[in-house]
Amino acid sequence: MAVYKAAAGAADRVVGRGSNTAAEAGSNSTAGAGATDHAEVDFGFERVSPAEKTRRVAGVFSSVAKRYDLMNDLMSFGTHRLMKRMVMEMSGLRTGNRHLDLAGGTGDIAKLASPIVGDTGQVVLADINAEMLEVGRERLLDAGITNARACQANAEYLPFADNQFDCVTIGFGLRNVTDKDRALREMCRVLRPGGVLLVLEFSHIENPVLRGAYQSFQALWPSAGKALVGDAESYKYLVESIRVHPKQSALKLMIKDAGFNDASVDNLVGGAAAIHRGIKPAN
Ligand SMILES: C[S@@+](CC[C@H](N)C(=O)[O-])C[C@H]1O[C@@H](n2cnc3c(N)ncnc32)[C@H](O)[C@@H]1O
């Protein structure tokens, strides 16, 4: 099954099995990489060019796509599901709304949003990675969801017109985006005035005892990745990428700088994860 490359209008295609034509030529499974090579960025603890980061992040998720959900449940003891439900509670989504789930991967958030927006609304599951998106699209199909679209797109270059969505979510995705500021500005652009942005992401624990315990637990992730997915490196990247991700206060400022009002943050599990919220200013 082919998955669409990012291009204007790609979101208008229904989630469906069958063969589709890639809307934009591309030689690998990452849509619209678009990164420019002007400064180095973090890839975990390494500093690499933006293009290199985009390429290596694609490698990580292509490698883990098939067993991503299993690992997610094991590493979080299932709590990521509760966190995603909290995101939905905070979304203010209603029947008839349009929702964009960016870096949506295997479709957990899109699946929760679908019954809320109902038949008169629409959910767009977008991800840069064809393998992750394919797993997500299959899951939505298997759940009998008919109001969702799948779109392969880079969060930094969204193939949507301005003011399209009532809510944009990005769950455990922003950490992996090469140019986060640009992606946040894009999220603001595609939201309607008054629309809600919710960023669910791993974050930073203040309490040193809890932080130490959590870091000891994280030290097991590469070995678990090796045992279950045959890939320790991707889970080493995961641990490192969490450490170098902006702290709660810094991300809040980035959200404001991207054009949002009322930026706020709620810590989950002592800060192991956090939900940042921003509102696009009314006209
Ligand atoms: C950790 S997974 C999260 C998947 C899903 N949101 C969840 O919470 O289970 C991160 C996802 O971000 C996607 N991603 C990374 N960089 C991206 C970008 N620039 N634009 C869109 N998606 C991106 C990856 O392909 C991957 O599917």
Image (cartoon, grey):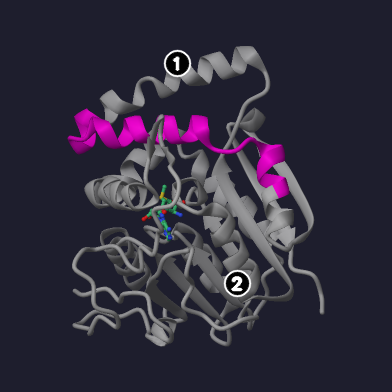
Q: Quadrant of residue 116?
A: bottom right
Q: Quadrant of ligand 1?
A: bottom left
Q: Nearer the viewer, residue 62 or 154?
A: 154
Which residue in the structure is indicated by mark 2? 116
Q: Nearer the viewer, mark 1 or mark 2?
A: 1
Which residue in the structure is indicated by mark 1? 216
In primary-sequence order, the first of circles 1 and 2 is: 2
The answer for how far apart the CA atoms under marks 1 and 2 are is 38 Å
At a point 73% along the width and 45% down the height, the residue shown is 265
At a point 39% along the width and 50% down the height, the residue shown is 50
Residue 257 on image: x %, y %: 72, 56
Q: Is residue 106 left or right of residue 266?
A: left
Amino acid type of disc 2? Ile
Amino acid type of disc 1? Ser
Extent of the magenta region: 226-253
The secondary element bearing badge 1 is classed as helix
